[in-house]
Image (cartoon, grey):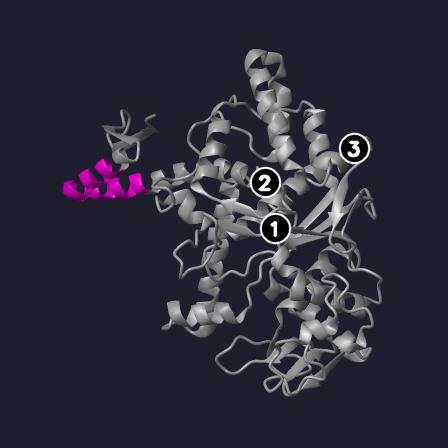
């Protein structure tokens, strides 16, 4: 392999040369969304960052030799609460299903618009309950877990090197834990593997009664099932290091008797919006969907490729300030890039080397921008530019209309055709004018062959 890939590993706080366990099957796990609400721009960051890693690994080891698993957490108390709020008239299971399906669908549309490849596998927590129960049984069997007051808890003191990833001493982890609430725990830091469900909570039969899993055990079960007891890279946001990733490690290592769960742990930095921590109450909570489809942020919609490029203009381990200024900067860059088709050519070695250096997307974008100017002057360089842009997932498209927008407009146009058939001309005119204000021009006519009313549309620039 001619590319030397170096990655910063949170486990030892060092950047080291990456050596896969099996170069024929490089295995990556990234914690996916809990599907109860729109994904916000902070959720978008790991999806984009690890998509670049996925693309790079595929380039180095071959498309067929990388397995990328990103889960969907579809059992969670936040989902239950949302189901009760949004679908109070449905039976609980149907209401939960409605929430998780709707949200997962939205998530997929959002990340597709951000130019992310689909992961190789996308397991759902509720399809892996059996595997979770098996791990919990193992942990009880080998003395790492115990049953107390309807819960199965992980015994943190039973693991001599608990806390390796976050490097927090147990005492510090316990600070602030309300002892009164946790009187049934052996140690304040012990965490839930399984808890009993009441009749109005989702539940599965288990040796400990009808219940549901804790969040951490879900990722141990799904990564184990799809990637094995020890795999190459585990990723996620910085906020997941403790307790989520620490507890994933505790569960997996103690159940399987392994030295590590994953060899490399990668974490992306925090996301702020306009210099402030995102919060709903401050009114600066921005969802991917809002950016793509509404004019809530800066009074306009932002194409997915601009959002993606804006994200990659900061190194993944640095905090990022998501702002209108930054998006405009990304837009100015991409506007100077030639539109190209995908290419089989080799990407620019400077771009590859930048990415191979712990995903230095900042340097890669700089080189890509220079390469764009060179390709504008010399068409021979176009294929190399296209291949390099594809490695970052920011290939400027030749078609001016992206697919998400096209299908949205198609849906509105066909709805409007129904209105015209029903002679609801007032409403139909209103829709035509609204689309026109957004730069989309409708043209009504008749199909020459069938005589049926048809409407075509185009984007004005
Ligand atoms: Zn996880």
Numbered-mark total:
3
The answer, for residue 123, to whether it is visible in the render is no
Q: Which residues are magenta?
A: 412-434
For marks 2 and 3 on the same chain, the one whose residue lies earlier in the sequence: 3
Image point 61% across, 64% down: which residue? Answer: 125
Q: Residues within 10 Å of mark 2 (few under 14, many from 20)?
A: some
Q: Position of residue 47 (x, y in %)?
A: 58, 48
**Circle 3 is placed at which residue position?**
3
Does the magenta run of residues contain 162?
A: no
Relative horizontal placement of residue 69, taking residue 327 as reference (left or right): right
Image point 80% across, 35% down: which residue? Answer: 4
**Circle 1 is placed at which residue position?**
269
Mark 1: secondary structure: loop
Ligand 1 - quadrant of the structure image? bottom right
Looking at the image, which is closer to me, 11 or 439? 11
Marks 1 and 3, how far apart in space? 26 Å
Mark 2: secondary structure: loop
Relative horizontal placement of residue 19, taking residue 401 as reference (left or right): right
């Amino acid at each position: 392999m001619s590319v030397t890939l170096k990655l910063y590993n949170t486990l030892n706080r060092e950047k080291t040369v990456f050596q896969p366990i099996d170069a024929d099957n490089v295995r990556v796990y990234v914690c996916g969304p809990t599907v109860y609400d729109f994904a916000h721009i902070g959720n978008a960051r790991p999806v984009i960052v690890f998509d670049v890693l996925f693309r790079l690994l595929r380039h180095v080891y071959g498309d067929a030799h990388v397995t990328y698993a990103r889960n969907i957490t579809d059992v969670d108390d936040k989902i239950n609460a949302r189901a009760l709020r949004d679908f109070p008239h449905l039976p609980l299971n149907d209401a939960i299903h409605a929430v998780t399906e709707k949200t997962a669908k939205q998530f997929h549309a959002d990340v597709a618009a951000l130019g992310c490849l689909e992961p190789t596998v996308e397991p759902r927590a509720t399809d892996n309950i059996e595997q979770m129960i098996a791990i919990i049984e193992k942990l009880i069997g080998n003395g790492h877990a115990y049953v107390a007051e309807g819960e199965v808890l992980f015994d943190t003191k039973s693991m001599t090197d608990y806390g390796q990833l976050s490097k927090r001493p147990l005492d510090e982890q316990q600070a602030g834990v309300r002892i009164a609430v946790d009187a049934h725990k052996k140690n304040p830091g012990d965490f839930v593997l399984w808890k009993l469900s009441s009749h109005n909570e989702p539940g599965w039969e288990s040796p400990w009664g009808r219940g549901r899993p804790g969040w951490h055990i879900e990722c141990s079960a799904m990564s184990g099932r799809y990637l094995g007891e020890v795999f190459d890279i585990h990723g996620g946001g910085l906020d997941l290091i403790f307790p989520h990733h620490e507890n994933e490690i505790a569960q997996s290592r103690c159940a399987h008797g392994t030295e590590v769960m994953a060899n490399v742990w990668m974490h992306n930095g925090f996301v702020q919006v306009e210099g402030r921590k995102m919060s709903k109450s401050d009114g600066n909570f921005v969802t991917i969907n809002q950016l793509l489809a509404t004019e809530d942020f800066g009074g306009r919609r932002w194409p997915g490729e601009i959002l993606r490029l804006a994200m990659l203009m900061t190194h993944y381990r640095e905090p990022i300030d998501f702002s209108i200024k930054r998006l405009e900067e990304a837009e100015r860059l991409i506007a100077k890039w030639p539109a190209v088709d995908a290419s089989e050519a080799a990407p620019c070695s400077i771009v590859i080397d930048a990415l191979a250096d712990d995903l230095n997307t900042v340097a890669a974008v700089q080189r890509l921008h220079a390469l764009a100017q060179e390709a504008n002057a010399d068409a021979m360089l176009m294929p190399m530019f296209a291949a390099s842009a594809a490695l970052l997932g920011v290939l400027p498209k030749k078609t001016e209309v992206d697919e998400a927008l096209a299908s949205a407009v198609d849906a509105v146009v066909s709805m409007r055709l129904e209105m015209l058939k029903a002679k609801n001309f007032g409403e139909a005119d209103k829709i035509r004018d609204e689309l026109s204000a957004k730069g989309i021009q409708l043209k009504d006519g008749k199909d020459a062959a069938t005589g049926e009313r048809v409407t075509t549309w185009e984007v004005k620039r």
